[in-house]
Image (spheres, rainbow, N blue to C red):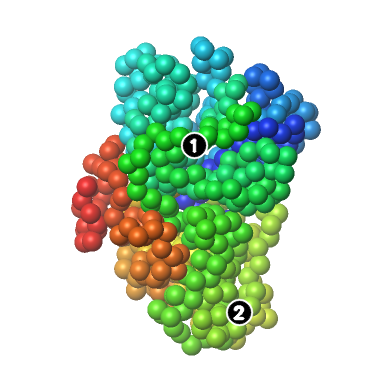
Amino acid sequence: MPNEIKGLNEECGLFGIWGHDNAAQLTYDGLHSLQHRGQEGAGIVSNQGGQFHRQRGLGLLGEVFSDPQKMTSLPGHAAIGHVRYATAGNHGIANIQPMYFDYPAEGQFALAHNGNLTNATHLRHELKEKGVQFQATSDSELLGELIQTSSQKDFIEQLKASLNQLRGGFAYLLMTPKMMVAALDPNGFRPLVIGKMNDGAIVICSETCALDQVGATFVRDVEPGEVIIVTDDGMTIDHFTTDTHLSICSMEYIYFARPDSVIRGISVHEARKRMGAAIAKEAPVKADVVIGVPNSSLSAAIGYAQASGIHYDMGMIKNQYVARTFIEPTQAKRVRGVSMKLSVVRSVVAGKDIVLVDDSIVRGTTSGYIVGLLKRAGAKSVHVRIASPVLKFPCYYGIDIQTTKELIGANHSVPEICQMIGADSLAYLSVDGLVKSIGDLNDQPNHGLCTAYFDGKYPTPLYDYQAGFDSEVARLGLYEGANKL
């Protein structure tokens, strides 16, 4: 993605299917539609009559599976797959999922995880004291080790007991020789959906766009605290806890999810259009044309144009064939990557007053580059409108902003940011405007959404991260409105 959320690109994508002769190929197809959730690595484990086969590697899905032999080496009627960008742990092959674990009663089980555990350090220490030897450095391994060391009598009871030891954000797909299992944390921070193929095969994946990709019909969302068990006999719904409080990550609607996905009954594209319309009402400006930063901000830009009555046009285009830049080690290389990815349609912007709609600003450097690009192309003025609130606080549930140091919104006022990026004006959507744009998911005070990155109101204790959070917000004076947990 060319826009500013370079530090938030850790999201992961899950896809699993049970009961289909072409399980691995469908898993590949489903993961392809989830590629936006993770570009660092990919893996698939297939299940052939209880025998597991695995292929995984670093890079994009198409790179990992470029050799056709890899797909033919994944036979079986069931499979789970994962696309990864690191939330925790090193960027290496050992952390590419799905992971394998030995299970005395049945042989093996495989596991794939999306999210971030807030008590991982504590759990890792406890497991090390029990003599556990870790195979990787990410927190995704912890559930597997907890299951292996559990004293419960069978796999599901071991899984439920282990899930109750976890804190933070997690969506899991597991596979044993006899079943596929999904589980979602008590707050439902990450989306997870269930679908069904025409032949009866069950699909569980991160977004509905992956169901559409493989021709599956949406059945239901996985609810917080649920354990979904799929076998040859069908699907069973169980729970590891009923103490739940829906707090789905608002960044799923703002940025992460694909616009053609539907999350908990709400179209991502329509929600983004409403965000654009809301910022148009909150911060109107006279201009000639509205443009969006491709691709994740286009829905919001359309909404801004419709609400404001200002003409919408394609003022910028994205080169789809440039290599990934978000993992480049230096800011200079990242900016060079953005310059190769984005170009301006001069006939749209030259001599015009522009409204530039983007979904968010993290560091500000890329936003400044884009404003400069538009002005060099002849724009008279550039008014930046962000279709989300100011990012001020870290996220500990699966978005890799665990420090405020790189968050320009935590360190500078909006007028200062406006000056730093060279814009003629700058405005962000209010938190209230964001919540109303997405819509009420339930009647709880938080409306079923997590907005902690904007208002500091975390829906859970922060455990291992609490001390670091306290020192950061105290240093920056951010406690106004933030809850001290």
Image coordinates of residue 429 in percent, x first then y, are 40, 70
Question: In the structure shown, which secondary structural element does the residue marked by tag 1 occupy?
Answer: strand
Question: Residue 80: where, in percent of width, then height?
Answer: 61, 33
- Where, by quadrant of the figure, is residue 152 drawn? top left
307 vs 408, left or right, is right
Disc 1 from disc 2: Cα separation: 46 Å
Q: Secondary structure at mark 2?
A: loop
Q: How many marks on residues?
A: 2
Please give the name of the residue rendered at 58% of the width and 27% of the height, measured from the top-left corner.
Answer: 179
**Marks 1, 2: nearer the viewer:** 1
Q: Residues within 10 Å of mark 2 (few under 14, many from 20)?
A: many
Q: Which residue is mark 1?
A: 237
Q: Residue at x 42, y 16 (%)?
A: 153
User: With respect to residue 91, does 375 lie above or below?
Assistant: below
The amino acid pointed to by label 1 is Ile
Residue situated furthest front in the rendering: 233
Q: Quadrant of the N terminus?
A: bottom right
Q: Residues within 10 Å of mark 1 (few under 14, many from 20)?
A: few
From the top left corner, tell me how far across and down residue 17 is, in percent.
Answer: 64, 36
Q: Type of residue at label 2?
A: Tyr
Return the mark for residue 312. Answer: 2
Q: Position of residue 143 (x, y in %)?
A: 43, 28
Q: Is residue 428 left or right of residue 103?
A: left
Answer yes or no: is residue 63 visible.
no
Residue 162 appears in which quarter of the rendering?
top left
Q: Earlier in the sequence, mark 1 or mark 2?
A: 1
Left or right of 27? Residue 437 is: left
In screen coordinates, is 66 left or right of 339?
right
Q: Which of the labelled discs sits on residue 470, or is there none?
A: none
- Mark yes or no: residue 473 visible: yes
Q: Residue at x 60, y 23 (%)?
A: 178
